[in-house]
Image (cartoon, rainbow, N blue to C red):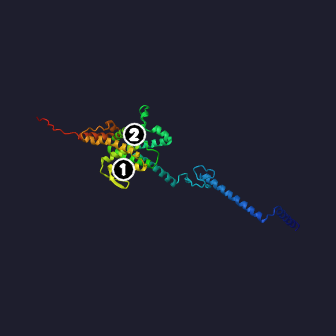
Amino acid sequence: SVCSVMAVAAAVSCIDTSAARQPIMLPSQRTAAFINKRSTQQQQQQSNIENALNLRGGASKKKRGGRTASLYSTSKKPSQKTATGKKKVQAAAKEAEKKSAVSDTLTKYKAILPLTRIYITLVGAVTLVGLLLGDELSQGLLALDPIRTMYGLELWRPFTAACFLGPPSIGWLMSAYYLFEYGSSLERAFGTAQHLLFLLIQIGFLSVCSAFFGQPFFAQSVITSMLHVLSRSMPNQKVKWLIFTVPYWTLPYGLMASDVLQAGNAGAALPHVLGILSGHVYYFHKNVWPKLGGEDWLVPPQFLVNKLEGRSAAKDSISNALKSRKKGAGRKLGSK
């Protein structure tokens, strides 16, 4: 019929007009459109993932300075923390090793006997002051000067002269080791109070002798005096010196000979000679003179013993005094 023909014609015309309105796309344009659509979908998926992570409180790209790790971190240095903000096991182990090394050093330092520890600390402090001031200023401030000591009341000079071993070197390390070894042995054998009395006698005697011979420092003489006293206490004991086995009493002279050979000058023997002389003065009045019938006057006061060594040392001294008392021929009670 006429109406059906007109309807078909109208539909065909509508299809033609809609097709005419749509632009014709080339294959390259279709590929670009597909890529844009795909990238848009990927961006949408990425934003959804970030939103989900933010809701969970997890990693975020913006929080690079926080405690959480970043999924997009491009740093070359390995992170020392995990995604939860805790330190890695390896980093914690390294820090524990560092702390243990420091604590072990402090433990060994505190284990040194008190007077020897103070002496070694003073040696290190005086050496540091000498490095900071230089040779000329350190000589003017630390060296033994009798006039400034007596008239200027610069009373620290005998003590700094007994602690200065020169600038750091191999010889300085060897002298510091000898000071620690011989000082610890004497303090362990005599006690802290008696060792303090020994050091004060050495500093006083060597200050006079060094001022007479023009020696500004006498720390090496103190070390030799310690060695001489130790060697005289057991003179026939065999000890190793370099590659030789010698009696103990010859060790101070061997140390003096080695210093003379290294310096190439006989003047290097003077500190050792003064140390042997000073040490023998102490040894004679402490050990030889009482055996000859003299009085042992090199005894520290009791309050110093109580202060430095505690009550146990005081009890030991009292018990020793009671044991040394002579028993007389007394009479029994009631006897005529």
User: Which residue is rendered at x = 38% and y = 49% of the image?
Assistant: 257
Asked if residue 21 is positioned above or below residue 161 in the image, the reply reads below
Q: Residue furthest bottom?
A: 1
* Whole-number angstrom distance, CA of label 2 to CA of label 1: 23 Å
* Front: mark 2 or 1: 2
Total numbered badges shown on the rendered structure:
2
| Amino acid at circle 1 | Gly
Q: Which mark is residue 213?
A: 2
Residue 106 left/right relative to 28 = left
Q: Residues within 10 Å of mark 1 (few under 14, many from 20)?
A: some
Q: Which one is in front, 81 or 54?
A: 81
Asked if residue 328 is positioned above or below residue 85 in the image, the reply reads above
Q: Quadrant of residue 157?
A: top left
| Amino acid at circle 2 | Phe
Element type at mark 2: helix
- Quarter occupied by the C terminus: top left
Q: Residues within 10 Å of mark 2 (few under 14, many from 20)?
A: few
